[in-house]
C-alpha cells in the first residue's frame, strides 16, 4: 500500500449502497479510493493531507440526476456576482456529478445548417451565449476548454433533435427527417451521451406523437441507455401521460426514467397514491422503471410554457408576432380558460396567482411577484401582463410555479426507486428557484433528520449509488476500493439548506468537504479553486 494524496479519518462511512454506516477511514491516491479500517495507516509513504472527519459522515459525491446546467460554466465561470454564485452553487451542496440535457432540451445535436438559428434560441433558454453543437463531442470539447469543479454528463434532448432537423414547427416529422434525427442521436450516444430525454409539454417536443418518440427511444435501447421523460402532462392527465411513457418504454425496449415525478395542479393533488403503485407494480413485473424528485412544492420553467402549444409554433419570432396581435391574445386567453386537447395548461390547472416571475432581466421590479399581483397593480388582465412582459424581454422570462402539495412530494421521496434531482435552472440574474443551491442538504436536513421520512443511508443511496447505476456512471456513486474519488464529508446534525425564494443562492450549512476527481474542491464550506471536473463520456 502506497501513501495517499488525501486521508479522511474518523468518519462514519455511508458508502452509497444503502448498507448501514460504519466507522472507516478513506484514502485517496491518483484519483481513486481505498477503504481502511479505523486508524489504519498506509504501509509505505506519507499522506499529503489528512482530514479529521470525527462526528461527520463520509459519503460518495452526490449525483444530481436532473439539471439544466448545460451551459452555465460556458457563460464565464470566473465572473463575479450572481454568475459566480450560480456556477458554485451545485458543488457547494455536495454535487460532484451533474446530468444535464433534461426535459428534451440541450445544446446538441443539430444539422450544421440549423446551428445559427438554434444559437439564438439557446441564448434565450440558457441565459447567454452558450453556443450550439453538432454532436456530443463538440459539446464536450467546449466544456473541456473551461475548467470546472465537478463533473458533467449529458442526455440528448428530443426537442433539440427536432429543432435541429425540422425547426420549431408544429407538424409530424417526415420519415427522412426521423431517420436523420435517429442518426444524430445514435452518433451522440456513441460518443458518450447518457441517454435520450423528452420534454413533452414543451415545444417543439410536444409537437411529436408517440411513434416518433418510440423510434428514438429504440436507438437509446440499442446503446443500453435510458429513456428519460418529462411526461406530456403532470397535472390533470398525469396518469394518461405515465401510460404513454410506459408504452414508449415497452415498444422501444429502453429503460424508463420519469423526471421530477409530481402530480401538480389542484385537479391532480393526491394522485401519487395511484401513480406510485402503478410504477411499483411495473417494477414487480420486471420492468426497469425509476424516477427522480426535488424536495419542493414549487417548480420552475419558462413563462412561454404557460401559453398553448400553437402559440410557439415557428419559434420566438412567430410567438412575438402573435403576442402583439390582440386577436391572438384573446385566442390564448380562451385556450387557457377552456383548455386545449393534449395540453397540460398549467395556468388553467392552478391560476396566475401561483405563477411568480423568477427572472426578467429588463424588468427586475417584476421579479418575485406573481402575474396576478402585477396585473392587479396595473389594472390589467393577467394574460396581457404576461404577453407584454414576454415581448419586452424577447421571450427571456423564467417563472416559478407553486403547483404541488407537500403530501405528494413526501410520497415520491419515500418511494424506494426514487432518486434526487434538483431540476436546477441556473440562468444568470433574477431569483432562480432555491433548489439549485439547496436540494441535497434539504433532503438530508428536513426529510432525514427533522421528519424521519428517510433513513440516512437510504437518502444517501438515492443521491449516489442508485443514481450512478441508473445513468451508467461506472465507478461512481459508491465508496469502495478502486472507485473514483468523488466524496462529501458532512455533519448530519447540522446539514441544512438556507436558500429561499427571496435569497435563492445562499449556500447550505453542514457540507464541510467536497472531493471531486481526487482533489478537494470545497473545504469548510468554501471553494478551494481546484478545477478537476470533466465531461463524462458514458
Image: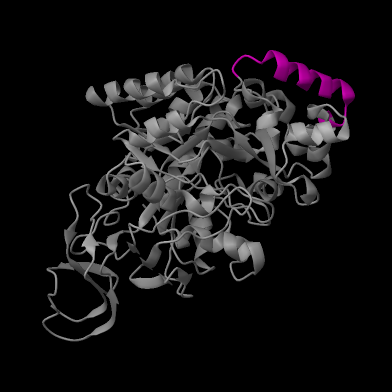
The magenta region covers 322-342
From the viewer's perspective, is residue 402 above or below residue 90?
above
Horizontal and vertical percent for residue 206? 59, 27
Q: Main secondary structure of the magenta part?
A: helix
Whether residue 150 appears in magenta in the rendering, the answer is no
At a point 30% along the width and 50% down the height, the residue shown is: 460
Foreground: 92 or 388? Answer: 92
Q: Residue at x 47, y 30 (%)?
A: 262
Q: Position of residue 20 (x, y in %)?
A: 18, 50
Residue 328 lies in the magenta-colored region: yes
User: Which quadrant holds residue 266?
Assistant: top right
Q: Residue at x 63, y 24 (%)?
A: 350
The reply, left or right, for residue 214 in relation to residue 352 is left
Q: How many marks?
A: 0
One can see residue 500 in this view: yes
x%, y% of residue 355? 67, 34
Residue in the foreground of this view, choosing between 110 and 82: 82
Residue at 43% x, 54% y is: 496
From the viewer's perspective, is residue 482 above or below residue 242? below
Q: Residue 136, relative to residue 291: is it above or below?
A: below
Query: Where's the N terminus, which quadrant?
Result: bottom left
Relative placement, left or right, of 389 versus 490 is right
Q: In the rendered view, does 33 fall on the left or right side of 237?
A: left
Q: Quadrant of residue 255?
A: top left
Residue 25 coordinates in the image, percent (x, y): 19, 69
Rendering colour mode: one colour
Q: Is residue 192 visible?
A: no
Amino acid at each position: 500500500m502506497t501513501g495517499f494524496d488525501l486521508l479522511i479519518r474518523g468518519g462514519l462511512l455511508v458508502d452509497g449502497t444503502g448498507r448501514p454506516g460504519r466507522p472507516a477511514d478513506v484514502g485517496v491516491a491518483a484519483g481513486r479510493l481505498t477503504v481502511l479500517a479505523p486508524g489504519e495507516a498506509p504501509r509505505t509513504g506519507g499522506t499529503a493531507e489528512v482530514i479529521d472527519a470525527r462526528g461527520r459522515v463520509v459519503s460518495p459525491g452526490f449525483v444530481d440526476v436532473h439539471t439544466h446546467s448545460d451551459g452555465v460554466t460556458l457563460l464565464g465561470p470566473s465572473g463575479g456576482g450572481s454568475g459566480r454564485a450560480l456556477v458554485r452553487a451545485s458543488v457547494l451542496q455536495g454535487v460532484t456529478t451533474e446530468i444535464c440535457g433534461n426535459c428534451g432540451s440541450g445544446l446538441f445535436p443539430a444539422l450544421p445548417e440549423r446551428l445559427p438559428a438554434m444559437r439564438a434560441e439557446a441564448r434565450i433558454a440558457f441565459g447567454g451565449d452558450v453556443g450550439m453543437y453538432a454532436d456530443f463531442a463538440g459539446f464536450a470539447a467546449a466544456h473541456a476548454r473551461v475548467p470546472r469543479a465537478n463533473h458533467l454528463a449529458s442526455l440528448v434532448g428530443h426537442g433539440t433533435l427536432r429543432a435541429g432537423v425540422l425547426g420549431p414547427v408544429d407538424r409530424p416529422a417526415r420519415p427522412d427527417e426521423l431517420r436523420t434525427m435517429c442518426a444524430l442521436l445514435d452518433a451522440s450516444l456513441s460518443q458518450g451521451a447518457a441517454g435520450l430525454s423528452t420534454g413533452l409539454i414543451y415545444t417543439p417536443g410536444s409537437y411529436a406523437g408517440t411513434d416518433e418518440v418510440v423510434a428514438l427511444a429504440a436507438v437509446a435501447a440499442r446503446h443500453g441507455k435510458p429513456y428519460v421523460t418529462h411526461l406530456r402532462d403532470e397535472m390533470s392527465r398525469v396518469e394518461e401521460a405515465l401510460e404513454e411513457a410506459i408504452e414508449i418504454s415497452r415498444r422501444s425496449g429502453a429503460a424508463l426514467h420519469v423526471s421530477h415525478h409530481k402530480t401538480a395542479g389542484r385537479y391532480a393533488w393526491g394522485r401519487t397514491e395511484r401513480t406510485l403503485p402503478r410504477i411499483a407494480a411495473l417494477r414487480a413485473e420486471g420492468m426497469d422503471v425509476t424516477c427522480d424528485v426535488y424536495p419542493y412544492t414549487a417548480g420552475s420553467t419558462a413563462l412561454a410554457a404557460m401559453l398553448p402549444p400553437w402559440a410557439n409554433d415557428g419559434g420566438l419570432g412567430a410567438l412575438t408576432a402573435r403576442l402583439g396581435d390582440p386577436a391572438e391574445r384573446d385566442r390564448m386567453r380562451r385556450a387557457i380558460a377552456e383548455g386545449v386537447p393534449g395540453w397540460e395548461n398549467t395556468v388553467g390547472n392552478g391560476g396566475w396567482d401561483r405563477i411568480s416571475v423568477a427572472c426578467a432581466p429588463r424588468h427586475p421590479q417584476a421579479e418575485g411577484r406573481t402575474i396576478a399581483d402585477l396585473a392587479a397593480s396595473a389594472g390589467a388582465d393577467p394574460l396581457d401582463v404576461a404577453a407584454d412582459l414576454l415581448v419586452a424581454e424577447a421571450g427571456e422570462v423564467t417563472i416559478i410555479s407553486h403547483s404541488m402539495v407537500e403530501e405528494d412530494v413526501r410520497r415520491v421521496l419515500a418511494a424506494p426507486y426514487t432518486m434526487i434531482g434538483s431540476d436546477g435552472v441556473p440562468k444568470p440574474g433574477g431569483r432562480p428557484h432555491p433548489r439549485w443551491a439547496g436540494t441535497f442538504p434539504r433532503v438530508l436536513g428536513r426529510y432525514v433528520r427533522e421528519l424521519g421520512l428517510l433513513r440516512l443511508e437510504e437518502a444517501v443511496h438515492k443521491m449516489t449509488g442508485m443514481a450512478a447505476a441508473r445513468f451508467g456512471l461506472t465507478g461512481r456513486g459508491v465508496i469502495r476500493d478502486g472507485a473514483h474519488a468523488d466524496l462529501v464529508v458532512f455533519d448530519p446534525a447540522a446539514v441544512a439548506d438556507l436558500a429561499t425564494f427571496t435569497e435563492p443562492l445562499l449556500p447550505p450549512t453542514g457540507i464541510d468537504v467536497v472531493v471531486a476527481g481526487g482533489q478537494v474542491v470545497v473545504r469548510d464550506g468554501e471553494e478551494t479553486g481546484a478545477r478537476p471536473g470533466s465531461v463524462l463520456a458514458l
